[in-house]
Image: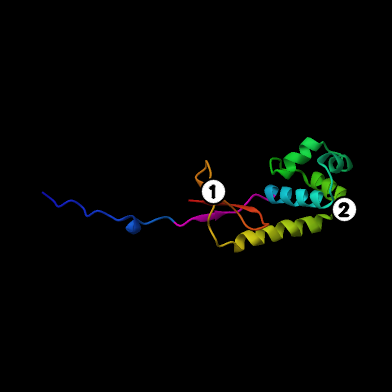
């Protein structure tokens, strides 16, 4: 009869390293649009009216639920007195900040990932 395998302590169990899943462009874009709108002290209705879209659609864009066309992005950016390059650079800066994020803590989600929000920065998903 063979000897049973020795018990493994939890610290000896190999774990897979977590890998960072970059946030979607539409989520970061929505956060930037909402930030710009709030800086102007405007309601969804005011900004949406100037952009020629419904407040419901703008709300969905700000929450990252819709993938707006380039024409829609331009209309909302102009309604907020922003240029497409300013908006693009702001979203790119958020993506750069995500790539520099090193602290990994957060709340468990249904997908088995952790959601982390850096101070003032975008949300980041980390897969196990």
Residue at (68% x, 58% y) in the render: 94
In the image, the segment drawn in magenta is 17-25
* Left or right: 5 as drawn, with respect to 77: left
57 vs 37, nearest the viewer: 37
Residue 22 colored in magenta in the image: yes
Residue 92 is situated, as x and y percent measured from the top left of the image, at 71, 59
Magenta highlight on residue 27: no
Horizontal side of residue 70 vs 22, given as left or right: right
Total residue callouts = 2
Identify the mark nearer the N-term, 1 or 2: 2
Q: Secondary structure at mark 2?
A: loop
* Residue at 21% over, 53% down: 5
Give how far across and how far down residue 26 sits, in percent.
70, 47
Q: Is residue 13 above or below residue 100?
A: above
Q: Which residue is mark 2?
A: 81
Determine the image quadrant of residue 43: top right
Q: Quick one: SS at disc 1?
A: strand
Q: Which residue is mark 1?
A: 107
- Which numbered dot is residue 52? none
Q: Residue furthest left?
A: 1
Name the residue nearer the viewer: 121 or 85: 121
Q: Position of residue 21 (x, y in %)?
A: 57, 53
Taking depth in this image into account, of 84 and 117 the one nearest to the observer is 117
Which residue lies at the image location 84% right of the left edge and 46% below the top edge?
42
Q: Position of residue 1 (x, y in %)?
A: 10, 49
């Amino acid at each position: 009869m063979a000897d049973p395998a020795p018990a493994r302590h939890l610290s000896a169990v190999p774990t897979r390293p977590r890998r960072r899943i970059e946030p979607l462009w539409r989520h970061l874009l929505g956060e930037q649009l909402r930030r710009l709108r709030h800086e102007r002290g405007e309601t969804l209705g005011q900004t949406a009216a100037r952009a020629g879209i419904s407040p419901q659609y703008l709300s969905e864009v700000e929450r990252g639920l819709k993938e707006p066309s380039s024409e829609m992005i331009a209309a909302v950016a102009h309604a907020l007195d922003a240029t497409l390059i300013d908006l693009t650079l702001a979203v790119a800066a958020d993506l750069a900040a995500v790539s520099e994020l090193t602290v990994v803590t957060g709340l468990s989600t249904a997908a088995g990932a952790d959601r982390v929000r850096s101070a003032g920065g975008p949300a980041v998903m980390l897969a196990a």
